[in-house]
Image (cartoon, rainbow, N blue to C red):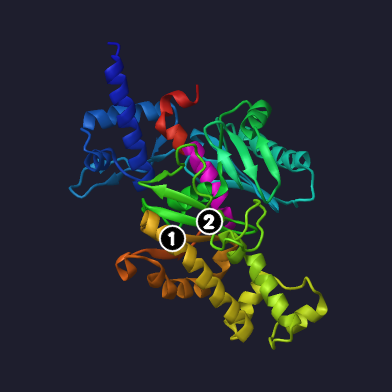
Amino acid sequence: MTETADQLYVRKVNTVIVLDALRRMQPISRAGLSKKTGLNRSTISSIIQSLLDIHFVRETELVMDRVGRPAMPLTLDPNGGFAIGLEINVDYVSAILVDFNGQLRRKLYRSVNTNMPQHEILMTAIRMTTTLVELGREQELPFMGIGIGLPGVVDSHGGKLIFAPNLGWRDLDIGWLFFNEFNAPILVENEANCAALGEYRYGAARGVNSLIYLSAGIGLGGGILIDGEVFHGSQGFAGEIGHMQIQRDGIPCACGKRGCWEIYVSPRVLIENVRKSLQQGTASSLTPLLQRSEYALTFRQILEAAEHGDGLATEVLTQLGQDLAAGIGNLVNIFNPTTIVIGGTLTQAGTLLIPAIQKQLPNQVLAGEHALVQLVPSQLGVDACVHGAIALVLDAVMRDPTNWLN
């Protein structure tokens, strides 16, 4: 008998519920899914059969449940398809191939720089993506799509980059460019939003529905998740927290304004502050590096010096923690998140920075110590964005599994 429109809608919703439960709790039996979702066993069995038919779910080894009856645990089928996650950032392009069960099958990385022409960076990204798509097809997996993370203001609905200040790019229809090249679904998102989604699905914020991800590198971006969904704002441009103006007549920013938060908390600013102090004669174990070359200092070396008790390195990191706490306090006052993930380059400094931020934070938050927020370093590090780009695709597939591959 043909299902009515209402029945089809209910079945679609129930399928999404089952897939979400399966993704979070696999391996799990049909009886376990029924208990977790509240759906009756006949509904579960019907949905699972349809997912088995399209190779989105597979049965694993037979086990005995607690009352001695056999149960066939279910997992997502890694051979159900593959997705590509791509990040185009200021100084690198990264791409990964992941199967339907979220397992990494291949990763590619290429260094780039802002002196390279836009078309050269884009061709690098296209060649890397082509390599991974060919690999996925060699394994005879269905191609589910490409998620792309970009550093700047992104129109995620239209698949367009509006403005990337640290790249100097404007008005790039990257979704059309990649669709034209690969003829597959293309999902485009701000890199910090991608990273927040990556940490939520696969990293430090699994199970946390309200979080803010701070993405620090050359700039400072923010990804905001509310009830497990990326907060885009009315036009999709939310999350540019690095451009909060904290000093009205402060240092010029690449965006054209002055005194943006990212100017004071990026790793390159910390390096520059250390370099200036060394040039002024401040005693430090880092002095020989500066004597070797003006550009020898790295963020990692400053962290190592602080870990060994160097006074200058400790001082600048403490100041960085205070400057981070000032902006984080604003975010806590506005959004009251459960968790803030410290990501990007600053992940390396988590054990040093997080205590400094936590010490200052009660003074920056209106609710003081009552505003309980957990600060954690990223688990995925520089790969947070590409894993979030994968999540864009797999989440879209799981919202409409029976029609996606058509």
Q: Is residue 201 above or below residue 280?
A: above
- Graded by Cα atoms within 10 Å as few (under 14), some (14 to 19) or many (20 or more), the crowding at tag 2 reads some
Instruction: Give the amino acid at mark 1.
Output: Asn
Residue 56 visible in rendering: no
Residue 71 appears in which quarter of the rendering?
Answer: top left
Magenta span: predominant SS is: helix
Extreme left residue here? 67
Q: Is residue 372 left or right of residue 214?
A: left
Q: Tags 2 and 1 in contact by the CB under 8 Å rule?
A: yes
Residue at the far bottom in the pictured view: 283
Residue at image location 27% in from the left, 32% down from the top: 44
**Crowd band around label 1 with a 10 angstrom C-alpha radius: few (<14), some (14–19), many (20+):** some
Q: Secondary structure at mark 1?
A: helix
Q: Which mark is residue 330?
A: 1
Q: Which residue is mark 2?
A: 244
User: Residue 233: horizontal and vertical position, in percent?
Assistant: 45, 41
Where 311 falls versus 202 (above or below)?
A: below
Left or right side of 346 for 27: left
Residue sitting nearer the eye, 322 or 52: 322
- Of the image marks 2 and 1, the number of the one nearer the N terminus: 2
Magenta segment, which residues? 381-394
Measure the alpha-carbon separation of dots 2 and 1: 10 Å
Residue 295 position (above or below residue 119): below
Quadrant placement of the N terminus: top left
Q: Is residue 207 above or below residue 348?
A: above
User: Residue at the right extreme?
Assistant: 292
Q: Is residue 27 visible?
A: yes
Q: Amino acid at mark 2?
A: Met
Residue at 56%, 54% (x, y): give it: 243
Whether the magenta-drawn stretch holds residue 395 is answered as no
Location of residue 177 (image quadrant): top right
